[in-house]
Image (tube, rainbow, N blue to C red):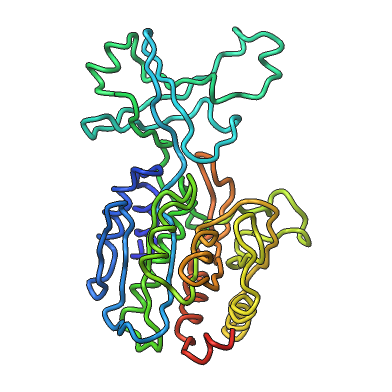
Amino acid sequence: MTDRLALIRDLTNANGISGFEDEVVDVVKKYASRDLDLRVDPMRNVYLSLKGNTGRRPMVMIDSHSDEIGFMVQTITGNGLIKFIAIGGWQGSNVPAHKVRIRNSRGEYVYGITTSKPPHFMSAAEKNAAPDIDNLYIDIGATSREEVVDVFGIEVANPVIPDVEFSINEKNGIMCAKAFDNRIGCACEVALMNQLASENLKVDVVGAVSTQEEVGLRGAGVTSNVIKPDLAIVFEGTPADDVYTDKYSCQAGLKKGPQVRHRDGSMITHPGFLAYARFVAKKAGIAFQDAVRTGGGTNAGAIHLAHHGVPTVVIGVPARYIHSHYGYCAFEDYENAIKWAYEIVKSLDVSTIKSL
């Protein structure tokens, strides 16, 4: 297994819903080059700085977010079921009848199943109704509240994560994992910063692996105001649409290259920087996809409003079925996203940035 594939494996296997990203931080620390300056702030945002930064050149920010969607324990019933709430955007129909991991207050993982009533006990109305998270529980096989608390050590506010392990199909290079949104972006950022560490650049570069994107772009609100960038590139695991659309409508297909967003619910992309990014990709022979999104958002929504206003582009790696337990992602799209960002950063200088 290559180092980059191992990086993706370890990042996606790490458990880290919004506010509980410590395992992801540990993986970033493990794989980040020793030629980078690394620090972690109280919010668990990770900063990766090039040692060649001077403080006198334009500042380029590279961003990805470390958190994944999941759940949190809300209450525990008398018969040993665990009531939970969603952390991040879940569709109710994707939640029942899946395995999950609960990190108890001792730091141990307890495995459970999100409840689903057997059809034998369902009324006709229940069978036709869409599942509602408010009516679901987690069952760890206990028979009382006391067993859940005293034996398994589960308490209110413990984080809950889908129980999924990374795999790759060697025949076609398609990876399967949880949390491609946005651990694939984290893997892009770490690999890019490691590559840039040995380059002689004309700009300063700081990477931020930021927390709590799924609950309101909170970490990026901090990191962007700490770094004060003049330009920013955001890596994201972007929702693939190739199984829902024809070839002319598709804007995020696997193995069709990374995606650049012209617009989503959080940002209209700076046209000058967008045009430059597309020019660089074409010059380097990197296939890419253009997207106009009606909704959704990324950390770019916070970053482009920070400091004095920051031209920002989002480079997305298409991932099928994000915001569910499992996703598919193409390794070649990941590699091309890194290459694209590398070519952009390597080409930047003061005059280029001023011309955008």
The residue nearer to you, when weighing 221 against 329, is 221
- Which of the 4 image quarters holds residue 52? bottom left
Count numbered badges in the picture. 0
Answer above or below: position of 340 versus 57. above
- Which image quarter holds the N terminus? bottom left
Q: Residue at x 40, y 36 (%)?
A: 161
Answer above or below: position of 183 versus 91. below
Q: In this view, which residue lies farthest toward the front?
A: 308
The residue nearer to you, when weighing 117 against 5, is 117
The picture places residue 130, in percent across and down from the top left corner, at 66, 24
Answer above or below: position of 34 versus 29. below
The residue nearer to you, when weighing 292 against 98, is 292
Q: Is residue 100 left or right of residue 255?
A: left
Q: Residue at x 25, y 60 (%)?
A: 30
The picture places residue 193, in percent across and down from the top left corner, at 36, 72
The picture places residue 270, in percent across and down from the top left corner, at 62, 72
Q: Residue at x 41, y 78 (%)?
A: 59
Q: Residue at x 41, y 60 (%)?
A: 186
- Which image quarter holds the C terminus? bottom right
